[in-house]
Image: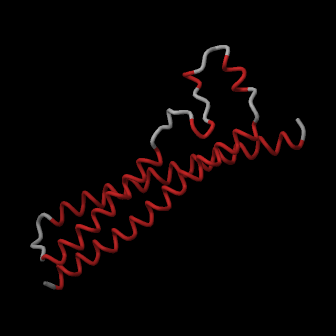
Amino acid sequence: MSATDRNLSAAHAEVKAEITRTDTKTALLLAFVGAVLAGTWTVARDLPLNPAACVVGGFGLVLLVGAAGLLLRSVRPNLSGRHGFPLWATLSAEEIPAAVGGDLAADIASLSRLAVAKFTCLRRAVDLTQAGGALLLLAALLTAGGAA
């Protein structure tokens, strides 16, 4: 195996590992957002909320639901075959050798685009989660302070 082949194999493994790390982070953030949504609902339904807290808290919840949507989009299975993913289950026995013998550099580029798309969704979801959490905190302060 030449040095170029080893470098390509290492790059391929690195991109696949980055996709795995991004999916793991996405799963953890999705669980966190779900817990925050459930906890907020549980707490808010038992509190006498003033109108300002309802509006601010409502916007916070909308942002969290948006973050959950981005997270789900990030981990949604790609069955269309875009981004160079070979869909082994859709290939015939004759097509598999051609797919396996394909250009590793092209696969790295395709997987890298997929990783960037996943990472972008994750980053946006983190931003929405932070903004939603800040609004929920503000709603809690408005409720505790009794602002009208």
Q: Nearer the viewer, residue 111 or 6?
A: 111
Q: Which quadrant holds residue 125?
A: bottom left
Q: Nearer the viewer, residue 53 or 20?
A: 53
Compared to residue 120, the image places residue 87 above or below, namely above
Residue positioned 66% across, 47% down in the render: 15
> Quadrant of the rendered structure where residue 12 is?
top right
In this view, the residue in front, 78 or 15, is: 78
Q: Quadrant of the N terminus?
A: top right
State the colouring used for the structure image: secondary structure
Against 43, residue 21 (above or below) is above
Measured as percent of width and height from the top left, residue 84 is found at 63, 37
In the drawing, does residue 25 fall left or right of residue 68?
right
Q: Nearer the viewer, residue 81 or 42?
A: 81
Q: Position of residue 86 (x, y in %)?
A: 61, 30
Residue at the outermost right position = 2
Q: How many marks?
A: 0
In the drawing, does residue 133 fall left or right of residue 94?
left
Q: Where does residue 13 sit, x and y in percent of width and height?
A: 70, 43
Q: Residue shown at 29%/62% (left/top)?
A: 62
* Quarter of image, res 43: bottom left
Quarter the C terminus occupies: bottom left
In the displayed structure image, the side of residue 72 where residue 8 appears, left or right: right
Vertical arrangement, residue 60 with respect to residue 140, above or below? above
**Where residue 114 appears, x then y in whole percent?**
59, 46
- Residue at image point 45% right, 42% down: 76
